[in-house]
Amino acid sequence: MQIFIKILLTIFLVYVTYRIWEVDIDVTKFRPDKFFKSKTEELISQIPQREKNAIYQNDSIVARVKNLSFREESNGMYFDQLEYSNSLNIEKEFEFQKYILKIIKIENLINMSSSESHKGRILQQVYCSVIRKR
């Protein structure tokens, strides 16, 4: 009886293997790189990401870089204009993109522009030193 079951099981497995071998499988759907890329993108989309034009202190947005106008220099960074900066403590370090910066010099500080009061305090020509990368 055991031999009969083993023979039957072997015939079944050979038949299943043959059917799978002969089936026209669309292998493009089973490519590991596409599978992992879609899963990775799905996971990344769930992670809260920082805004590119935002300046952060204590994990909160405290200012915004106008038109993303900044330039990296050898020993620091220069911003043309920072807006909505009422909450920015200019004495403390802050985070911008991948950098931790500290303000060295502000050429022009406008507490409230009468024409653009909704922008809050505006800092112009801001020079910062790079403390380190995040």
Image (spheres, rainbow, N blue to C red):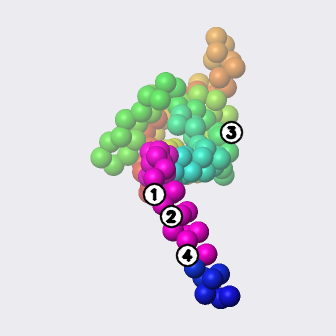
Q: Where on the picture, by quarter, is residue 60?
A: top right
Q: Determine the secondary structure under disc 3.
A: loop
Residue 35 visible in the picture: yes
In the depicted view, which residue is nearer to us: 131 or 49? 49
Q: Which kind of residue does numbered mark 3 sit on? A: Ser
Whole-Å distance between the Cαs marked 1 and 2? 6 Å
Question: Residue 26 location in percent, x, y?
Answer: 47, 45
Extreme residue in the bottom direction: 2
Position of 119 compared to 76: left or right?
A: right
Magenta segment's dominant SS is helix
Residue occupied by mark 4: 10
Range of the magenta residues? 8-34
Tell which of 72 and 120 is nearer to you.
72
Does 13 appear above or below 30? below
Q: Which residue is mark 2?
A: 17
Q: Are marks 4 and 3 in contact (CB under 8 Å)?
A: no
Which one is in front in this view, the residue at disc 2 or the one at disc 3?
2
Q: Is residue 86 left or right of residue 73?
A: right
The residue positioned 49% from the left and 24% from the top of the image is: 67
* Residue for badge 3: 87
**Residue type at numbered disc 4:** Thr
Residue depicted at x 61% and y 51%: 43
The nearer-to-camera label among 4 and 1 is 4
CB under 8 Å between discs 1 and 2: yes
Q: Which residue is mark 1?
A: 21
| Circle nearer the N terminus (4, 3) | 4
